Image (spheres, helix red, strand yellow):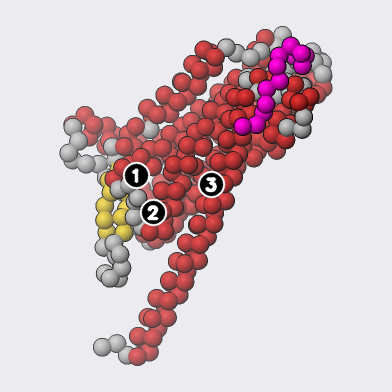
Amino acid sequence: MLPSSDFNFNIHDYEEENHAESYGAYTVLILAVVIFSVGIIGNLSVMCIVCHNYYMRSISNSLLANLALWDFVVIFFCLPLVVFHALTKKWLLGEFSCRIIPYLEVVSLGVTTFTLCALCIDRFRAASNVKMYYEMIENWVSTTAKLTVIWVGALLLALPELLIRQLVTEDGDPPDVTPCERCVIRISTDLPDTLYVLGLTYDGARLWWYFGCYFCLPTLFTICSSLLTARKIRRAERSCVRGSKKQIQLESQMNCAVVALAILYGFCSIPENICNILTAYMAVSVPRRALDILHLVSQLLLFCKSAVAPVLLFTLCQPFTKAFLDYNEQNVTELELSPFSTIHRAARTYPTVATHC
């Protein structure tokens, strides 16, 4: 039998732990509500602006709308399931959600990576194109082909995530606590030999694949490309071959927006890479609870990135700001074909298209 002092001490620790878990649960719930609200409204606004406004249907804006679409999907489907598991320690849809949530999160990383690279290439071509033929609205076939490459590439590269996930149930600590369901990286021996070898290969290279393809590639490529684009813009400003100063200013705004998106993405990806490194090399020495908290933080930051991205666009890009505020029909008809084009259409040439849903 424990002495009364030790028993009281254990009860006190247990109560403090319960209070800490309650505060943590409320914090996660409040953050999730804020992220969900901002992300849904912001990404829907970006998609509606680009789809419903003829003057915003450039390839750059189509890429941004494509990114907003995937961010909307991730927030709408993944965030509620992740929060439910964080609060109840159970997966709402069992094995299906255990496999599909990590898969969709990795696809989100791929879509963001390839979209940032495509945006950088498009902006560099636009800044280099003195004759501005590239600033015209592209036909739907060309735009669809580029977006399809991004989606198919991201979906295929993330497929091995479905092979390495399993749902396991661990007994609670203490034993009277409800068992906890965990989604762990474990390759099933029931898989065919080809898929089993693929899963083992992917699991062995997963850490550095994450770090190289989904972190270094978009951040470094975006920074280098944006520096070259900024140099082109400064040359155009000195030579005045690209039109009015207003258009050159809009080019600079979008270049800054692309850099801001890359920085946001890189910052929100850091905890995920740290979690992968700790899990691979220091899993024994790091407490399980600390790894769980770090993994939850990395997931919430991924959702936060998806919610903050449209806010950055509305803050840094004047055409998106004008369309979002929707002052009056005259402002809508004065929107450029893209944030960089000097080509305008008269209000009588095309019917005014609403910029809101």
- Residue 120 location, quadrant: top right
Quick one: quadrant of the N terminus? Answer: bottom left
Q: Which mark is on residue 36? A: 3
Disc 2 marks a residue whose amino acid type is: His
Residue 271 falls left or right of residue 284: right
Q: Nearer the viewer, residue 307 or 8?
A: 307
Any magenta on residue 340? no
Q: Quadrant of residue 222?
A: top right
Residue drawn at x 20%, y 36% as measured from the top left: 191
Classed neighbour count for the residue bearing mark 2: other residues with Cα under 10 Å, few (<14), some (14–19), many (≥20):
some
Real-space CA distance between mark 1 and mark 3, rounded to the nearest whole angstrom: 19 Å
Q: Secondary structure at mark 3?
A: helix
The residue stretch that appears in magenta: 345-357
Disc 1 residue type? Answer: Ser
Q: Is residue 227 visible?
A: no
- State if disc 1 and disc 2 touch (CB < 8 Å): yes
- What secondary structure do most residues of the magenta stretch adopt? loop
Between disc 2 and disc 1, whose residue precedes? 2
Q: Which mark is residue 85?
A: 2
**In the rendering, at what x and y percent does residue 102 appear?**
38, 41
- Identify the mark nearer the N-term, 1 or 3: 3
Q: Quadrant of residue 52?
A: top right
Q: Is residue 223 left or right of residue 192?
A: right
- Real-space CA distance between mark 3 and mark 2, rounded to the nearest whole angstrom: 16 Å
Q: Is residue 163 left or right of residue 70?
A: left
Q: Which mark is residue 292?
A: none
**Could you say which is closer to the camera, residue 349 or residue 112?**
349
Residue designated by label 1: 97
